[in-house]
């Protein structure tokens, strides 16, 4: 007959539900860290030589999240730029505004929400709003020095919580 332990229930397998409850945060951290890790370690911003210029008259403009989504007459697609934030839409809404920006030559970046293509750098009517190099540098910094460390911390905390010595002793 199995020994009764009031803290753990009857026998060795009775505490599975309690173990899952204790480790719910660890499972949540793993669920957050894994997709973040895939994104942060598999994607890096392109190099400047991997971009091509697109330009033309602005068709439509809309705020989206931290940036703007716009179309360019005669150029297929919707384009996203976060150089000027969501409030920069007014800068491009004036009739006849001509923009210049850069997209990847080989379209390896995933489409953003709503099917928009990520752009770097932005000029409106010949005036520089954001340098392409600055945008690339910001994306590189964010990808390498923000997302990756957050991923590693989440994984470390989750694994540490899952493999705490007292849990290993209890499972034996």
Image: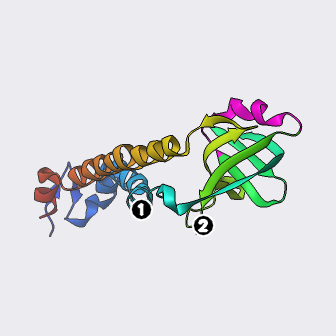
Which numbered marker is on residue 107?
2
On screen, residue 39 versus residue 74, left or right, reads left
Q: Residues within 10 Å of mark 1 (few under 14, many from 20)?
A: few
The local secondary structure at tag 1 comes to helix
In the foreground, 50 or 45: 50
Q: Residues within 10 Å of mark 2 (few under 14, many from 20)?
A: few
The local secondary structure at tag 2 comes to loop
Which corner quadrant of the image does residue 66 belong to? top right
Q: Are marks 1 and 2 in contact (CB under 8 Å)?
A: no
In the foreground, 8 or 80: 80
- Give the alpha-carbon distance from disc 1 to disc 2, as whole Å: 19 Å
In the rendered image, residue 29, in percent from the top left (x then y), is placed at 37, 50
Residue at left offset 42%, top offset 44% = 142
In the rendered image, residue 50, in percent from the top left (x then y), is placed at 52, 62
Q: Considering only vertical position in the picture, is 108 above or below 66?
A: below
**Range of the magenta residues?**
81-95
Residue at left offset 34%, top offset 50% = 148
Residue at left offset 79%, top offset 43% = 98
On screen, residue 53 versus residue 21, left or right, reads right
Q: Considering only vertical position in the picture, is 166 above or below 109?
A: above
Instruction: Please name the colour scheme applied to the rendered image.
Output: rainbow
């Amino acid at each position: 007959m199995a020994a009764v332990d009031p803290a753990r229930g009857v026998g060795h397998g009775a505490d599975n539900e309690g173990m899952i409850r204790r480790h719910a945060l660890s499972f949540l951290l793993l669920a957050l860290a894994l997709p973040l890790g895939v994104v942060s370690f598999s994607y890096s911003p392109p190099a400047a030589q991997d971009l091509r210029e697109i330009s033309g008259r602005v068709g439509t403009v809309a705020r989206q999240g931290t940036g703007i989504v716009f179309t360019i007459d005669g150029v297929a697609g919707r384009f996203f730029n976060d150089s000027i934030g969501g409030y920069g839409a007014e800068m491009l809404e004036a009739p006849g505004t001509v923009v210049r920006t850069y997209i990847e030559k080989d379209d390896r970046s995933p489409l953003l929400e709503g099917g928009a293509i990520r752009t770097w750098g932005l000029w409106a009517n010949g005036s520089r709003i954001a340098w392409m190099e600055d945008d690339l540098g910001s994306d590189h910094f964010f990808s390498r020095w923000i997302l990756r460390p957050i991923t590693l911390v989440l994984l470390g905390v989750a694994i540490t919580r899952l493999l705490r010595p007292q849990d290993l002793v209890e499972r034996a």
